[in-house]
Amino acid sequence: MQLRIHPLKLELKRPFTIAHGTFHYREAVVVELIAGDLSGFGEATAISYYGKDLNYFIEVLEKYRVQIEARYFTNPTTYYHYLYPYLKDHPFLLCALDVAAHDLWAQRLGVPLYEALGLSIDHLIPSNFTIGIGTIEEMLEQMASLNFPIYKIKLGTKEDINIIKALRAKSDAIFRIDANGAWSAEETIANAKVLKELRVEFIEQPLPQEDWAGMKEVYEQSVLPIIADESCQTPEDIKRCHNHFHGVNIKLMKCGGITPALEMIKEAKALGMKVMVGCMTESSIGISAIAHLVPLLDYVDMDGALLLKDDPADGVWLEDGELFFVDEDGTGAILKDMA
């Protein structure tokens, strides 16, 4: 097996602001696993506030190139567990390789990945579209740019409630709130009462990820469901989030890929929690991988490629929130300059 590394600079259509800062582009690396005449693709995004750097990604991949290329795998789960001791401290890269392995595996089987996983796409939930923090006018413009049935709205300002009131006056869509840890427990409990009246569906990660005592208080008193994001990054976090959150937002890059994500989905459901899979700012390589897990989910946030000025990849796409799969085996994703 051969590893090929494709560095990318993902420029955004417009500056994207969340509680962590404002971003104009993201750097990413696409890994390609080549076996015979087949190639599997996976992606890792370099996120500064997670300490992820593109050059460092490439250095780590080159450091373990021999191990990555040495193993011929019959299924991606065995490959994941083989790679884990080398890359356990690099979940974004582990994710890219695990997704590429799943893509390659399903192609070998001659079926789309969802079918290889024993799933059906007959009934799919829609994705939300994310609105970054800005002035009310800017956020209204973002909302109007695409006709989605669901919007996830980033908050963490002194005008949060006024923002939602203004957006609600212009739309009957479902609203979801993501505060990215910017609120206190007291604020969250109070805000939830107002937001429920504004027909908000749930609040994602209102408190800093380490504030477990505050989250217990919010869990017990909030009139809206609370979904974990930063507080739920690895399989070990599911049990900890139980009775602190009503559901979890699983990010493939944070947990290490499809293999651990499937474990997390199974455990969360067994505990009676809602399950969402979310995205980073990603090309259609990463977004296509998420799409194949949608049959297992209660909610999905896979709009990352829509935030890009020019998506360097083709694959599963969204139209007005609805998922459309390409007629290809594996994840169906490929870099455009290789098509």
Image: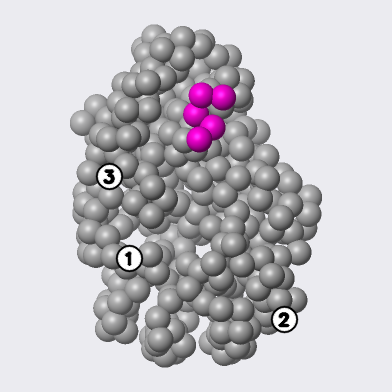
Magenta stretch: includes residue 87: yes
Residue 82 visible in this rendered orientation of the protein: yes
**Measuring 37% from the left and 25% from the top, which residue is drawn there?**
61
Q: Nearer the viewer, mark 1 or mark 3?
A: 1
User: Residue 306: horizontal and vertical position, in percent?
Assistant: 32, 55
Question: Which part of the image, by quadrant, shows the C terminus?
Answer: top left
Range drawn in magenta: 85-89
Q: SS class of the residue under badge 2?
A: helix
Q: SS class of the residue under badge 1?
A: strand
Report the predominant secondary structure element of the magenta stretch: helix
Q: Nearer the viewer, mark 1 or mark 2?
A: 1
Q: Which residue is mark 3?
A: 27
The label number, if any, that marks residue 221 in the structure image: 2
| Crowd class of label 3 (few under 14; some 14 to 19; many from 20; radius 10 Å) | many
User: Residue 99: horizontal and vertical position, in percent?
Assistant: 48, 32
Magenta stretch: includes residue 335: no
Mark 2 and mark 3: span between their CA atoms?
A: 40 Å
Tell me which label, 2 or 3, sits earlier in the chain.
3
Looking at the rendered structure, the kind of residue marked 1 is Gly
Mark 1 and mark 3: span between their CA atoms?
A: 16 Å
Q: SS class of the residue under badge 3?
A: strand
Q: Is residue 144 above or below residue 67?
A: below
Mark 1 and mark 2: span between their CA atoms?
A: 30 Å
Looking at the rendered structure, the kind of residue marked 3 is Glu
Tell me which label, 1 or 2, sits earlier in the chain.
1
**Measuring 22% from the left and 64% from the top, which residue is drawn there?**
14
User: Residue 187: horizontal and vertical position, in percent?
Assistant: 56, 84
**Measuring 28% from the left and 65% from the top, which residue is drawn there?**
22
Q: Which residue is mark 1?
A: 21
